[in-house]
Image (tube, rainbow, N blue to C red):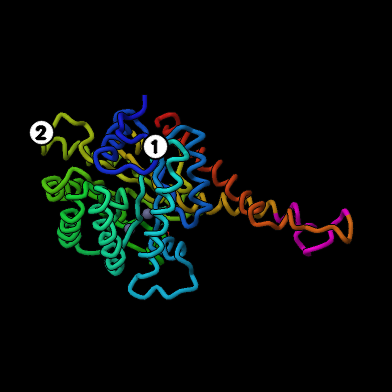
Amino acid sequence: MGPNLKNKSGVIYGEDVRTLFKHAQENKYAIPAINVTSSSTVVAALEAAKDAKAPIILQLSQGGAAYFCGKGIDNKDQSASIAGAIAAAHYIRAVAPSYGVPVVLHTDHCAKKLLPWLDGMLDEDERHFKEHGEPLYSSHMIDLSEEAVDWNIKTTADYLKRAAPMKQWLEMEIGITGGEEDGVNNESVDNNSLYTQPEDIYEIYKALSPISPYFSIAAGFGNVHGVYKPGNVKLRPELLKKHQAYVKEKESTKDEKPVFLVFHGGSGSTKEDYKEAISYGVVKVNLDTDLQWAYTEGIRDYMYKKKDYVSSQVGNPEGDDKPNKKYYDPRVWVREGEKTMTKRVQTALNDFNTAGQA
Ligand SMILES: O=C(CO)COP(=O)(O)O
Ligand SMILES: O=C[C@H](O)COP(=O)(O)O
Ligand SMILES: [Zn+2]
Ligand SMILES: [Zn+2]
């Protein structure tokens, strides 16, 4: 039995998002959050969710949103990232119902210097809310993990106050994710700041829960963006168990998993790490790099295989006058990338136990 949602197909928001995440915790699954940058990557992810009858999260990074708008224009004051995020949201809202599964529409990270991006999207969310009774985006992320903890919590609380009347979800980050994000290189950050302490989680919980129940925490447990050589990343998912136990005790609640947790840097991790993290209340696992690789593989293999059919517009091994239009039509070779990306998303849906949960 899937979660009891008011809206079972297309973009969901508000109570439905919380119901989905609580159902995920109770049934020990997590929803993959797929970074999308184009209509092609959107449909590749949606197709996997449809085939697996699973909920899915589609998210845009600031760079992904700018790309959606077009790299050929200036991103002054985040104008391209704002316009791209709005365009992607309308596109996803329009096609998602055709796929018959619940979709959470989300934005990724957003460091301090990118807050004008978030502000611009929230302006649009509020406009959309006035007109349709729901925000354009189901949720956003704010990532002040590189700032002082107090300022991170205070500023996140201010943004949650703005999101709360729209019943919009807010994900925040504490403890830095290593590797690279938003074009910032965190490869050399001090190892200790990759591992969040339970006291910090409780401080966040205390500050945010009186404002709105719609928030989640990306708590660092050694997470790193990207894929490196084996052994480079040491995940400690058992820390997440401590966070839940600490908040449960402090709040004297019966809920074993009072905090909605998010797993960043999902690419390249082991099934055991996913499973363990999910058992401690992770409801969302972010995946980007592995899908970039999967998408590239399909196109790469096509180009290698059809090399003699895409080297000139006319003429191939079947004859010097044979046209190659049906080989170089981008719908043909881009589709090969979509197929391999869809397959990788399906693997995630199986690994995270999401398949069949829609
Ligand atoms: O955390 C992520 C996006 O925020 C994705 O990380 P990976 O690229 O390591 O999968
Ligand atoms: O931050 C992590 C995501 O993988 C987004 O990456 P990006 O900024 O390269 O789009
Ligand atoms: Zn971060
Ligand atoms: Zn991330």
Residue 157 lies left or right of residue 263; in this view the side is left
Above or below: residue 357 compared with residue 197: above
- The quarter of the picture where the C terminus appears is top left
Q: Position of residue 125 (x, y in %)?
A: 27, 56
Q: Return the residue nearer the eye: 44 or 21.
A: 44
Amino acid carrying label 1: it is: Ser
Amino acid carrying label 2: it is: Ser
| Residue 271 within the segment the image draws in magenta | no
Q: Quadrant of ligand 4?
A: bottom left
The crowd level at tag 2 (other Cα within 10 Å; few <14, some 14-19, many 20+) is: few
Residue 144 lies left or right of residue 333; in this view the side is left
As measured in the structure, the alpha-carbon distance from the residue carrying label 2 to the one carrying label 1 is: 36 Å
| Residue 316 within the segment the image draws in magenta | yes
- The quarter of the picture where the N terminus appears is top left
Q: Return the residue nearer the eye: 272 or 281.
A: 281
The residue that disc 2 covers is 252
Q: Return the residue nearer the eye: 216 or 165.
A: 165
Most distant residue in the front direction: 131
The residue that disc 1 covers is 9
Q: Position of residue 224 (x, y in %)?
A: 40, 54
Most distant residue in the right direction: 319
Q: What residue appears at the point 49 percent right and 56 percent down from the top-left corner?
A: 38
Q: Return the residue nearer the eye: 348 or 235.
A: 348
- On whether ligand 1 comes within 8 Å of the CB at mark 1, the answer is no
Q: Position of residue 334 (x, y in %)?
A: 61, 53
The crowd level at tag 1 (other Cα within 10 Å; few <14, some 14-19, many 20+) is: some
Disc 1 secondary structure class: loop
Residue 112 lies left or right of residue 358; in this view the side is left
Mark number displayed over residue 103: none
